Amino acid sequence: MSMLWYYRHDHQITGPIPLHAIERYLILGRLGLDDEVSEDKTSWQTIRDCPAFAATCRLILEGDEARLVAARRFADERNQARRASLQDQPEEHRRSDRRGDEPPELSELRSHRADLFEPHKEKSWMGYILIACLIGLVTLAIVFYQPVNPIKISLTRH
């Protein structure tokens, strides 16, 4: 049995990915039992009919909601510690966790911190003046350039 699989979901093929990733997607509901998997992208079968995913399919089809919720909690890649701590809190406390308007003192503190730690972008007028002088010198050299007439030297005597 191959360790890497392809899956076809909504007419889009994704992979190769490991078998456990497809099992995790199944548990989280990102893939359905009727989506197709393949080891070689040539022969496809539904996840429901594939023996490699039999245990995961059994978990989903059994209807044991407590085991499925525990499996989803384990498979979810988001911050598990934060999610676990939020489950013990009442709903209104979780809703108030969202950031609201800041007091003016905090906003002023943030702006002072930004002024202190962000580099200042002062315009250097000396650089602009130097570039303008160089351009002027090049322009003068082009305008007033007159080639020097070369001295003719011949090897024969007259």
Image: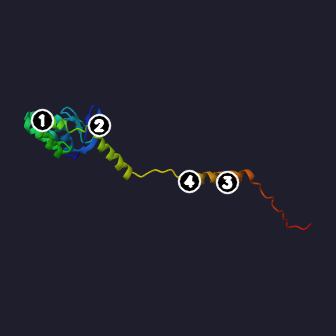
At a point 51% along the width and 50% down the height, the residue shown is 123
Image location (x, y in percent) of residue 29: 19, 35
| Tag 3–tag 2 contact (CB < 8 Å) | no
Q: In this view, does 155 lie above or below 44?
A: below
The earlier-in-sequence mark between 1 and 2 is 2
Seen in the image, is 140 located left or right of residue 102? right
**Residue underneath mark 2:** 13
Report the amino acid beneath label 2.
Answer: Ile
Residue 127, labelled with which disc? Answer: 4
Disc 1/disc 2 C-alpha distance (Å): 23 Å
- Residue at the far right in the pictured view: 158
Report the amino acid beneath label 1.
Answer: Ile
**Residue underneath mark 3:** 137
The earlier-in-sequence mark between 3 and 2 is 2
**Residue underneath mark 1:** 60
Number of marks in the image?
4
Disc 4/disc 1 C-alpha distance (Å): 69 Å
Mark 3, other Cα within 10 Å: few <14 / some 14–19 / many ≥20: few
Image location (x, y in percent) of residue 156: 88, 67
The earlier-in-sequence mark between 4 and 2 is 2
At a point 30% along the width and 44% down the height, the residue shown is 105
Q: Would residue 55 be visible to someone looking at this image?
A: no
Mark 1, other Cα within 10 Å: few <14 / some 14–19 / many ≥20: some
From the viewer's side, name the closer residue of 125 and 81: 125
Report the amino acid beneath label 3.
Answer: Leu
The earlier-in-sequence mark between 1 and 3 is 1
Disc 4/disc 3 C-alpha distance (Å): 15 Å
